[in-house]
Amino acid sequence: MQWMPRLLIALVMLFFCHLMACNNKNQVTVSQKETTHKNKKKPPVALVATEDMCKSSAYENIKGNVPRLKAMLSGKFTVYNTNRDSARQSYSPWLVNEGKDSVVVYTIPVGEANRNGHWLYLYQYMTSLPDEPIYEAFAKLERIDRDSIVAIYYEAPEDFKYSMADILADPKGLFKEFYFDDLLLSETGEKVWYIRQSPLKYYGISNWIDTEEHPRPDLKNGFNRDYYIVAPSNYHFGKEYYTKEKKTVGKTRGARLIRQQMLSEAYNGR
């Protein structure tokens, strides 16, 4: 997988967007609006920072395998290298742009689960350019069986103009008139299958990816797959390598996404 692989909307503007959407059922998104909030109750904020946000207790009472995984994947994360910093003896932030920027990932639940299914919006950016994502996508979580879930990835539409402040403020309300069914599948055909290894640990593996060219002879014309290890405090991802006969020959250490904020209790994974 490519690594993971934009202010609150007032009621009158949502109503306007609803009218526009009704006139064109094929339109995927509604446009970004500048709004005010006079005489309107402030909606809940999707993400929060709490003392227990990295503890099992923050997630163990969420009922349902899919809502629980969705809550664990949701949040604000900073990307860290897995190689330990010799000076600090801890994981160090992944720095880009000649060491000037770190990389931040937002994963936000969007839509209404009972009506739309379980959807996530992914937004990755460099700290100096928060309004210019280097990666964005939608993912739908679908239950396979008691211990298995598949995440199916979709392209973010070119005319998707919401700011992250909009989405964080009220993702359920903001996406009320969003046409999830019109989203296009990821160009890479990306899917990730998650297996529950314990109540609060999931192991995910992507679809097969051809590696026609590779400096290692045993990997030429072979395959690789992205892997993900999801836990309350962070999730870890990297790449597994296979021969052309699909025999495993090792994996990378990858990177860790360290949790800075968690999903608010107002959303509770639903």
Image (tube, rainbow, N blue to C red):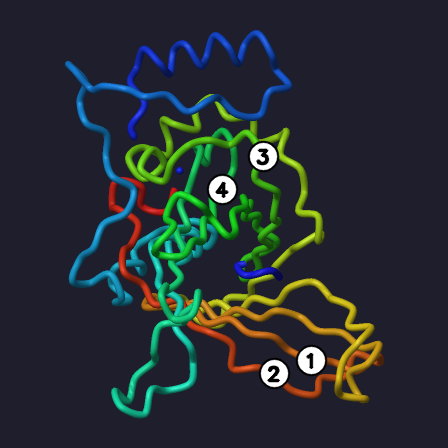
Residue of label 1: 241
Label 2–label 1 contact, CB within 8 A: yes
Q: CA distance from mark 1 to mark 3?
A: 32 Å
Tell me the SS state at disc 3: loop
Label 4–label 2 contact, CB within 8 A: no
Q: Quadrant of residue 259?
A: bottom left
* Horizontal and vertical percent position of residue 264: 26, 46
| Label number found at residue 5 | none
Residue of label 4: 118
The residue positioned 82% from the left and 73% from the top of the image is: 212
User: Does label 2 or label 3 sit earlier along the sequence?
Assistant: 3
* Horizontal and vertical percent position of residue 143: 57, 50
Tell me the SS state at disc 2: strand
User: Does label 4 or label 2 sit earlier along the sequence?
Assistant: 4
Taking the image as shown, residue 168 lies to the left or right of residue 175, namely left
Residue type at the position of mark 2: Lys
Q: Quadrant of residue 7?
A: top left
Residue of label 3: 157
Residue type at the position of mark 4: His
The residue positioned 54% from the left and 44% from the top of the image is: 138
Residue type at the position of mark 1: Tyr
